[in-house]
Image: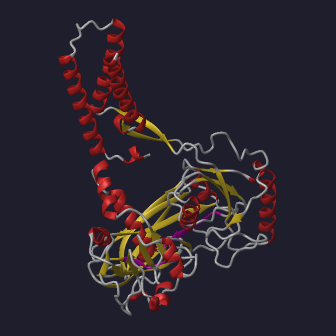
Amino acid sequence: MFLDEISIQTSILMYAGLGFIFFLGFGYYFFRNPIKNGHSLTWKIILGGFRGLILASLLIAIFPFKIFENLNSQEPVEFIFVVDFPELANKDFDQVFRKVDSIVKIKYPEVVWIDFKGQSVINFKKSLSNSRSLDQLNQTIRKLNKGRSSKEIFILTDGNLNDLNIELASNIHLIPYGKVLNKEKVEFSTTHLPLVSVPNEEVHLPIEVWLANFKQNKNVIIDVYVDGVFLKKQKVSFDSDHTYVITDVAVKSPKLGKHQIKVILDNGLSTLIDWNVVNEKAIVYGFSDALDPDVGVLNRVAKNKFIKLIWNFDLNANIPDQATKLIFLRILPKDMYKNKVLVSPVLFLNTSKDKVDVYLDRKKRNNHKIIVSEALWDLQMKEFQSHGSYAQTDSTIGTWLEDLYITNNPLIDSLNKNVGPAEDLLMEDISTPSLGRNDPKLNFLAQRNNIDLLEIDELANADFFPKGLNSNFKQDSVFIWQNIYFKLWVLFLILAEWIIRKFKELR
């Protein structure tokens, strides 16, 4: 209803106006009709009661009382089944996969398995572009959620996953498989894409270290070198409760150019990471029909992300040959640039989605983002009026820019000409591929509130549809006078008091 859209400032003015009108009418009525004019006691009680309720409601509206509202409490529960294919998918894994599939189909006959990239698994076959990155799975889950969180995710996995330090977007049920290996081993993972920063920006190199088949308490030493020069030494400790550790190394440089980081463990495992220090992380060309406040919002957020925006405000503007990253605000590019647009990361902002689909002539857009919303400036101001800042709006816009022009672009600048596209954006397991079950990683994940382990033997008796599994109650604190029912209550009281008084006068 339209009353839901009333802003805080408008609500304050509305209640101030209602209060003024009520007290003005209240005083005027008793000036003309003193209470001693022979009114009956019943009339005095009824009218006085209504006026008392109106007065109490207006006082509540004036003072900052709050109530709690339940939001999104009736979202339907949906189930997604994901398979994490091992590096070497052999006959034993195929049998396990088929067994789990047959068990879950008893309670969920229409089950469809997908991989981490959201692609359907056909005939239990591993896809060619397999990913084991939880970051990749998280992106897939968000696309499937479409802004909601009412999904339960079941993952068949041996635990040899990457990117364990990210926050997952839904409730996760891990179905572990594989045998625990007898020999204790130290393994580790780190980024395999080049680090990219601007001068004097501190970047963090994530390092995961774990003990496969824990035997005894142990310390592991990590040495880090930059361009052959020793940077720092870090020690990580393991015991029976902590067999998986995530640490990171902070690096920064004032010098432009390419650097190389070497990470080496005391058991001899090592890896090399390229590190590029650049003037800006991306150069993006923007096109719009006019200069307006939205351009300023985009410029400010892009600057905080070390992205340089170059704008053109001509409807007939030509796209420069060197432009490989693009923004179109309220307009579409000329047809002559369609081939260039199709292969470039592009943000279409407040341009009709149907028109963009027709222009692209396809529904699948891996490197395009279409956003149709209110003006960015209006969204920013609404958030500032209600929360005193526009951090959420900035974060949303920053995510668009980062996803399109930085995170999903392995060839991030001219310094990376020899770097090819990578499957997993953040982590790559550099240890020897194993068919064993990785209990340290599984136990580490299971410690989180929204993740649990569900053994294969427990599947048959597991309740896939527990009551209230995903009632998803979310409470939000709001002022009482922001509630639509309170607004209707005050309007009803004032109208009822007026009708009763007029009815009595007419009699």
Q: Position of residue 318 (x, y in %)?
A: 36, 90
Q: Is residue 216 above or below residue 477?
A: below
**From this viewpoint, which residue is outermost toward the front?**
507
Q: Is residue 352 left or right of residue 94?
A: left
In depth, the one of 425 and 13 nearer the eye is: 13
Using the rendered view, name the quadrant where residue 316 is placed: bottom left
In depth, the one of 217 and 34 nearer the eye is: 34
Q: Is residue 245 left or right of residue 54?
A: right
Q: Position of residue 325 (x, y in %)?
A: 41, 82
Using the rendered view, name the quadrant where residue 351 is placed: bottom left
Q: Is residue 220 above or below residue 268?
A: above
* Residue drawn where x is 58% and y is 75% of the image: 363
Mark count: 0
* Residue drawn where x is 57% and y is 77% of the image: 423
Q: Is residue 186 magenta?
A: yes
Task: Give the colour scheme shown.
Answer: secondary structure
Report the quarter where the C terminus lies.
top left
Q: Is residue 340 magenta?
A: no
Query: What kind of secondary structure does the magenta stretch mostly adopt?
Result: strand
Residue 265 seen in render: no
Q: Is residue 353 left or right of residue 66?
A: right
In depth, the one of 397 and 157 nearer the eye is: 397
* Residue drawn where x is 45% and y is 84% of the image: 411
Q: Position of residue 353 (x, y in %)?
A: 49, 71
* Residue drawn where x is 59% and y is 59% of the image: 441
Highlighted range, magenta: 184-196
Q: Is residue 15 left or right of residue 117?
A: left
